[in-house]
Image: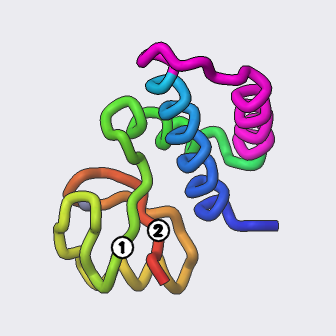
Amino acid sequence: MKNELEILVALQDLDLMLKELDEVRQLGFDVRSEGEEALAKAREELVSQISKPLLGNYERLRAKYKRAIVPVKGDTCLGCFMKLPTYLLTHMQRDQRVINCEGCGRILYWLK
Ligand SMILES: [Zn+2]
């Protein structure tokens, strides 16, 4: 079983793909609905594996930002480029906890 953070990253990927499909359609191109259905189905499967509070957190952020979940490189949030305090990074790495950036509020994941 993958951890929730990995699932959330995959979910964001799907959401961005769905959004792209939507944009392509708005440009007047024909989008095959089977493709969209497959994405929507995959999305449902991912959503069912994420806890309700975390999903709510993600959805709220997604309404505000294009990307709700952003990578951390070194000690810097790549969403807003704020340096993150050491205790937060320790918490995140050691306890595998889902952490929100103190600067932009987005969910963070470790860029390996
Ligand atoms: Zn940030």
Q: Residues within 10 Å of mark 2 (few under 14, many from 20)?
A: many
Q: In percent of the image, x 69 and y 48: which residue is there?
A: 50
Q: In percent of the image, x 50 and y 31: which residue is there?
A: 19
- Check disc 2 and report the residue beneath it: 109
Q: What is the distance, in whole Å, between disc 2 and disc 1 at their CAs? A: 6 Å
Measured as percent of width and height from the top left, residue 75 is found at: 27, 82
Magenta span contains residue 62: no
Splitting the image into four quadrants, where does ligand 1 fall?
bottom left
Numbered label attached to residue 72: 1
Please identify the quarter of the rendering in which residue 48 is found: top right
- Mark 2 near mark 1, Cβ–Cβ under 8 Å? yes
Measured as percent of width and height from the top left, residue 82 is found at: 17, 68
Q: Nearer the viewer, residue 17 or 100?
A: 17
In this rendering, would 63 be left or right of 112?
Answer: left
Please identify the quarter of the rendering in which residue 33 is found: top right
Mark 1 residue element: strand
Query: In the image, which residues are magenta?
Result: 25-48
